[in-house]
Image (spheres, rainbow, N blue to C red):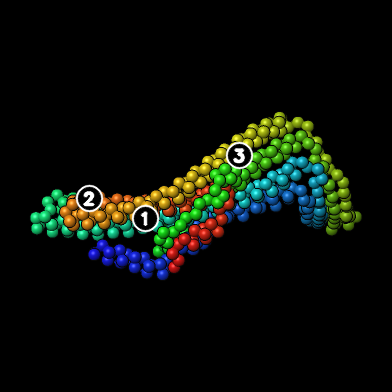
Amino acid sequence: MRNAKLVTLIAGAFLSLQAQAVNLLQLYQDALVNDAVYASARANLSAGQEASVQGRANLLPLIGIGGTYQRAQRGNVADIKSHGYTISLAQPLLDVAAWQNYEQSKLAVAASEAAFAVVQQDLILRVAQAYFDVLAAQDTLAALLVQKDAISEQLASAKRNFEVGTATITDTHEAQARYDLVIAQEFGAQNDLAIKRTALQQIIGKPPAELAILRKGVELNAPEPAQINAWVSSAEEQNYVVLQQKLALEIAKRDITRNRAGHYPTVDLVASRSDSNQRNSAIPSLNSGTGATSSIGLQWNIPLFSGFAVTSKVRQAIALEDKSRSDLESARRSAAQNAQQAYLGVTSGLAQVKALQAAEVSSRSALESNRLGYQVGVRINIDVLNAQQQLFITQRDLSKARYDTLMNSLRLKSAAGSLREQDLAQINTLLIQP
């Protein structure tokens, strides 16, 4: 049959393409190099890691050197030259604000790392979603091509039967209408596939090659552990957005102490060494110089009044701490909800895949039965066309259910804060490798 030949050709085309296909893990490696969002986050991480260095600087000695050189002309007689230098050192001994700023800077570095981890997980999800979107679009187009060929055969059969008087013109019109519809759907599917490939290109920075496809009849695994509460608890504590908010709360707490330090005294160890010299070419007796002078001591400062600025800043910091605490609770609830939705998505997806696999077998049997019934005259043309349409819809839904289940498994691990590149590698083993 022509339909069987077309299926064989499509299968052969897919097999030939697989020799040059790229898999999910390879595209993820391309995205690590070329994705603009990830590159921006990596640069932001590098910038954020400098916070601790800058915060520590306020606790280290401040050393400086300065000097002067002057030359003065008095009339046509005196030529006065003077020069000098000063080396100074200041070491903070008691500065609560500087210490809290240093502690905040270390927390800020940890927050930058958590923010980068969020972007890393997001990149995994974006690559996987774009990859499976392309596969789903390919599946839809391939199924439409098979369906178009089957309807074309049915249309030709209806025309032959009408010519010999064994069928009415209605059968021909029904088949022609279905054929015209599938042609329109084919154009839409081609456009959708081009859009999905463009979305993947935006992530990897270049046009994607042909993609490795899921193995036929692949078995998908249930979540491990199989208790939803375990995933929810992990999300509430280990989700990277939650970790960011935890760190933000700690920074806010230390900000209160740092602002209160505006009322506290500061003590510095100070030391200096200076020397100056002046020479008068006209009157040597006026030459002078201090010689080297060294000093060391303590310098302290006690703030007495700052126009209520310190008190206002403390109140502001307390309010921001309350905000951070509420943001943390919101992040926990959101992470828990995402974990619940993803877990239910995986479990219901597995059940849906199993049901659709059975439905595919039934739909295929129904199509064969209707074809046979049409040949012997107990079924009409519309019955065959409906059976073909039902098989196509079932195959499309089964393909989408598999991809959605895999994506929900990744989202579940992302919500729990455990999504890693190894999870993509595990899914990669389900693909037909090049």
Label 2's element?
A: helix
- Left or right, 170 with respect to 263, comes to left
* Spatial CA span between label 2 and label 1: 27 Å
- Left or right, 135 with respect to 226, comes to left
| Residue located 85% across and 53% down the image | 273
| Residue farthest toward the right in the current orientation of the protein | 285
| Residue located 56% across and 39% down the image | 333
- Rendering coords of residue 367 (x, y %): 27, 54
The residue pinned by badge 3 equals 328
Q: Amino acid at mark 2?
A: Asp
- Rendering coords of residue 224 (x, y %): 55, 51
Asked if residue 333 is positioned above or below residue 203 in the image, the reply reads above
The residue pinned by badge 1 equals 137
> Which quarter of the rendered picture does the C terminus lie within?
bottom left
171 or 42, which lies in front?
A: 171
User: Is any part of residue 94 visible from this angle?
Assistant: yes
- Left or right, 63 with respect to 49, comes to right
Q: Amino acid at mark 1?
A: Ala
Closer to the eye: label 2 or 1? 2
- Left or right, 233 with respect to 179, comes to right
Q: Amino acid at mark 3?
A: Leu
| Residue located 23% across and 53% down the image | 370
Query: Is tag 2's residue or tag 1's residue first in the polypeptide sequence?
Result: 1
> Which quarter of the rendered picture does the N terminus lie within?
bottom left
Asked if residue 185 is positioned above or below residue 233 in the image, the reply reads below
- Rendering coords of residue 78 (x, y %): 82, 55
User: Is any part of residue 196 visible from this angle?
Assistant: no
The residue pinned by badge 2 equals 383
* Spatial CA span between label 3 and label 2: 58 Å
Label 3's element?
A: helix
Query: Is tag 1's residue or tag 3's residue first in the polypeptide sequence?
Result: 1
30 or 57, which lies in front?
A: 30
